[in-house]
Amino acid sequence: MVVKHFCLQMEDSLKEITSHAVVSSWNEWDPLKHVIVGRASGTMIQASEPAVQNDWPQQGFPLGIFGPMPEQMEAKANEQLDNFAEILENRGIRVDRPVPLDFSQAIQTPDWNQDSMFGCMPPRDVLLTVGKEMLEATMSFRSRWFEYLCYRPLLEQYYKDDPNFRWESAPKPRLTERTYKQDFWQEWHSLSEEERWRHTENSDWIITETEPLFDAADVARFGHDLFVQKSMVTNDSGIEWLRRHYPGHRVHKVSYTDQLPWHIDATLIPLRPGLVLVNPERTALQKAHNVLFEKNGWELVEAPKSVRTEKMPLCTCSLWLNMNCLVLDPKTICIEAAETPMMELLDKYGFEVIPVPFFEVSPFGGGLHCATADVYREGSLEDYFPNQIDGV
Ligand code: ARG
């Protein structure tokens, strides 16, 4: 009896040793061993705030009305998220999940009150892993100010487990009225197409340069080179903050022909060294970025259109989520299960494609890349762009 108990205890502690977390990831393609997968539970159509004006009268959420996502939708999204987690686990990848807060509660700081939070389906938006460091992004919506708390139980554990883990948090923004351009939405709705494109060309969106702001999902990681998109949620000051924060990296500011850009992962997706998936409708505003890829032997492959013609109700993302894939290693890739043209393309490039049903998750904040955050990928810091261009 005593012996058996002892053995069980040994087994338990062995399990614990082998499962100790180690944090490290330098890019989007090295072999993935440990990842966070988000949860749909408790997600809200968030209350209006300067940066967010949801208006879905047909679905029962006209402007000014907020509340939990419909129960049925949440259940289906969670089912697809759990299934995705299981697919990854069956491939020997360790999967951790966040702990949702009560997102329906009102929150406040000394500067403002906000009637609800959002959710924790897309960890990619909040957590940026670069090497041995995980960085909690500033975020730029009031409803997402406290979202990092959902990941704290995990990060606390990684901090205990891995003596080399660098746990960082970017300066929490004030998000006062000064952070947002007044009447941006009102003006936007009154603009012609042409005028809207002018805003895009000038990167003139809702957030001001009052303080550094960025979402982690505006960063695409290519080893030494980080491509950061200026967007609705990332400003110049935020990009500059990242530049100073990663002195060992080259931070490239990029913009695309996307009217209201937010998050780079339906626009530019690294697949493996030398191959990057690009959005044919969103071209780089600075041609030099394409030259930078070409000068370093990178092939830019255009994503095919989604097979879907309509988005899910209550979805703020575009149909280009078909690009939003998770690379498991340079030969293996997860793609949304219905996206046959995308699967065929990657098959042609020699990938083993794992189809993952994920469309029901889209109203909760994105696709397979959004729904994950890297904890550990094998591999080390490499330079994939030895030929740089001045000023790019
Ligand atoms: N704004 C992108 C699009 O609709 C969606 C990106 C979502 N990404 C994310 N990490 N949540 O095309």
Image (cartoon, rainbow, N blue to C red):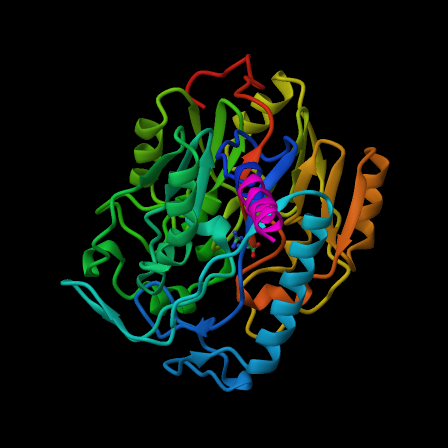
Taking the spot 64% from the left edge, 21% from the top edge, the residue there is 294
Q: Residue furthest top?
A: 387
Q: Which residues are magenta?
A: 1-14
Q: Which corner quadrant of the image does residue 149 belong to? A: bottom left
Query: Is 8 inside the magenta-drawn segment?
Result: yes
Q: Residue 207's spot in the image, x, y percent?
A: 31, 53
Q: Is residue 5 visible?
A: yes
The residue lying toward the viewer, choosing from 48 and 101, is: 101
Q: Residue 33's spot in the image, x, y percent?
A: 62, 38
On the rendered structure, is 391 left or right of 11? left
On the rendered structure, is 358 left or right of 149? right
Query: Is 360 inside the magenta-drawn segment?
Result: no
Considering the image in quadrants, where does the C terminus appear? top left
Q: Residue furthest left?
A: 110
Residue 85 in the image: above or below residue 290: below
Taking the spot 53% from the left edge, 67% from the top edge, the residue there is 40
Q: Main secondary structure of the magenta part?
A: helix
